[in-house]
């Protein structure tokens, strides 16, 4: 920062839909069931260098930025005062991770709402480009045939005992004649997937069902998802499909590996760990097996620091972690960028929420890459995993235009 900035927070009324308070169509957002934050402007920006130690560098740089600004809040509410939004690349050796403290953040949690300003009011062009009436699909970076072969190779390695699980992702490239609006996309994602955490951070837009970590004071919570199946055409079929997934040995193995991965790391950070029972998280187009892991931090850590300890989990990478990452680099045939990386927010006290960037798109003007992935364990079939990614891609396709039926 070239000059000293100061934060000021005032409690105020905000619209029921926080996106109605977002004056910048390409601003920042983190939204869940009516609560969350929207922001615009840029009081401070930290480009996180890739490579070993990136999480420590990010935490130290952000702590320095927060100290320079000051708390700026009398409210006893997580997220009041200056807040940083962040998005990190999946692969630690890939560039593109950043933390941004917006100039203005409008927030709401637990029935209280406020606005925090850091420095002078930014000049923002709030106009949205007219929406293109036809989104063009270029196709994936890797052909479906080649991706099917990659899944088959991964499943063979699992059966041979070389690896427990690996997650393989694929992308879909799209373009529009006019710039894609993050705010417009978020409106549709919020309406269709209210159970998810909708986000827009520095061109990464999506709605993830998976909470990597929430830290409030010393309390830690993570929501682990693994195992997917489509929704039924009616309640009876929906219940049958959910029960089928819960009884599936393949889906059960995938979920158990993911829960064990998170709980083992949480156990190194917390005095106590509580693992909930598995349940079904039902979204508009898909249902997942879900388990909540909770703990009390033994020492003070920020949500950003905890996210760095957990990433990448078995749910988005595989297990063992290093072997899975090497296999992803060898088989996937694309750069994941920030897909599968942590995305979320952290305040100056360390409170925050970080999701795994799933059901998301990297947006650059009128161009975008949509992403989806699938966990490969013994018994996975290439065709079944391809169908799973197609269902998941529908989430972001539905956000691109009014006419897309997903």
Image (spheres, grey):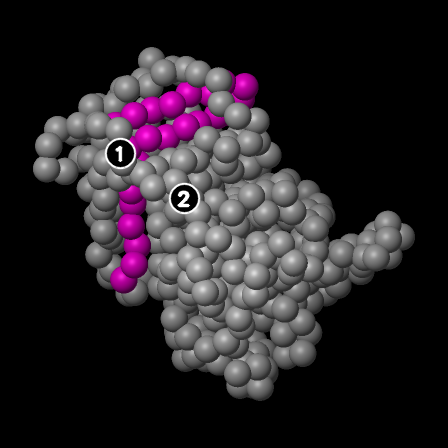
The kind of secondary structure the magenta stretch mainly shows is strand
Q: Quick one: which residue is furthest to the left in this view?
A: 2
Whether residue 112 is in magenta: the answer is: yes
Residue 179, x across and y down, in percent: 42, 57
Q: Is residue 369 left or right of residue 208?
A: left
Q: Categorize mark 2 by other alpha carbons within 10 Å: few (<14), some (14-19), many (20+).
A: few
Residue 88 seen: yes
Residue, disc 2: 127
In this orientation, which residue lies closer to the viewer: 121 or 299? Answer: 121
Residue 290, x across and y down, in percent: 64, 48
**Secondary structure at numbered mark 1:** loop
In this orientation, which residue lies closer to the viewer: 21 or 295? Answer: 21
**What residue appears at the point 35 percent right and 45 percent down from the top-left corner?**
86
Residue, disc 1: 122
371 is higher (above) or lower (below) than 98: below
Region rendered in magenta: 95-118
**What residue appears at the point 37 percent right and 30 percent down from the top-left corner?**
105
Q: Categorize mark 1 by other alpha carbons within 10 Å: few (<14), some (14-19), many (20+).
A: some
**Secondary structure at numbered mark 2:** loop
**Is label 2 or label 1 in front?**
2
Mark closer to the chain start, 2 or 1: 1
Q: Tell me the CA gap for discs 2 and 1.
A: 15 Å
């Amino acid at each position: 920062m070239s000059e000293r900035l100061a934060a000021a927070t005032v409690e105020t009324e905000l619209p029921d839909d926080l996106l109605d308070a977002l004056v910048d169509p390409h601003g920042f957002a983190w939204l869940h069931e009516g609560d969350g934050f929207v922001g615009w402007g840029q009081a401070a920006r930290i480009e996180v260098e890739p490579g070993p130690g990136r999480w420590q560098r990010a935490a130290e740089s952000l702590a320095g930025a927060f100290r320079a600004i000051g708390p700026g809040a009398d409210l006893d509410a997580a997220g009041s005062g200056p807040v940083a939004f962040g998005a990190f690349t999946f692969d630690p050796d890939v560039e593109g991770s950043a933390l941004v403290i917006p100039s203005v953040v409008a927030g709401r949690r637990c029935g209280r709402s406020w606005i925090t300003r850091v420095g002078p009011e930014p000049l923002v062009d709030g106009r949205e480009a007219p929406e293109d009436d036809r989104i063009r699909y270029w196709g994936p970076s890797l052909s479906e045939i080649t991706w099917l072969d990659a899944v088959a190779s991964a499943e063979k390695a699992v059966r041979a005992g070389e690896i427990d699980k690996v997650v393989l992702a694929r992308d879909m490239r799209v373009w529009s004649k006019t710039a894609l609006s993050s705010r417009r996309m978020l409106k549709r994602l919020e309406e269709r997937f209210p159970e998810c955490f909708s986000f827009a951070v520095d061109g990464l837009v999506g709605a993830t069902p998976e909470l990597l970590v929430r830290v409030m004071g010393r309390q830690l919570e993570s929501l682990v998802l693994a195992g997917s199946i489509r929704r039924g055409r009616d309640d009876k079929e929906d219940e049958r499909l959910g029960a089928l997934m819960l009884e599936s040995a393949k889906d059960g193995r995938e979920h158990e590996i993911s829960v064990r991965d998170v709980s083992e790391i949480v156990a190194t950070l917390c005095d106590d760990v509580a693992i909930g029972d598995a349940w079904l998280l039902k979204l508009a187009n898909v249902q997942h097996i879900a388990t909540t892991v909770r703990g009390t931090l033994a020492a003070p850590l920020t949500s950003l620091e905890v996210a760095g300890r957990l990433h990448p989990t078995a749910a988005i990478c595989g297990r063992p972690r290093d072997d899975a990452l090497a296999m992803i680099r060898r088989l996937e045939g694309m750069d994941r960028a920030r897909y599968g990386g942590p995305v979320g927010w952290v305040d100056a006290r360390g409170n925050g929420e970080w999701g795994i960037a799933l059901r998301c798109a990297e947006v650059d003007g009128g161009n975008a890459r949509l992403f989806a992935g699938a966990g490969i364990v013994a018994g996975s079939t290439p065709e079944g995993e391809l169908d799973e990614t197609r269902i998941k891609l529908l989430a972001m396709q539905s956000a691109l235009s009014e006419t897309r039926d997903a």
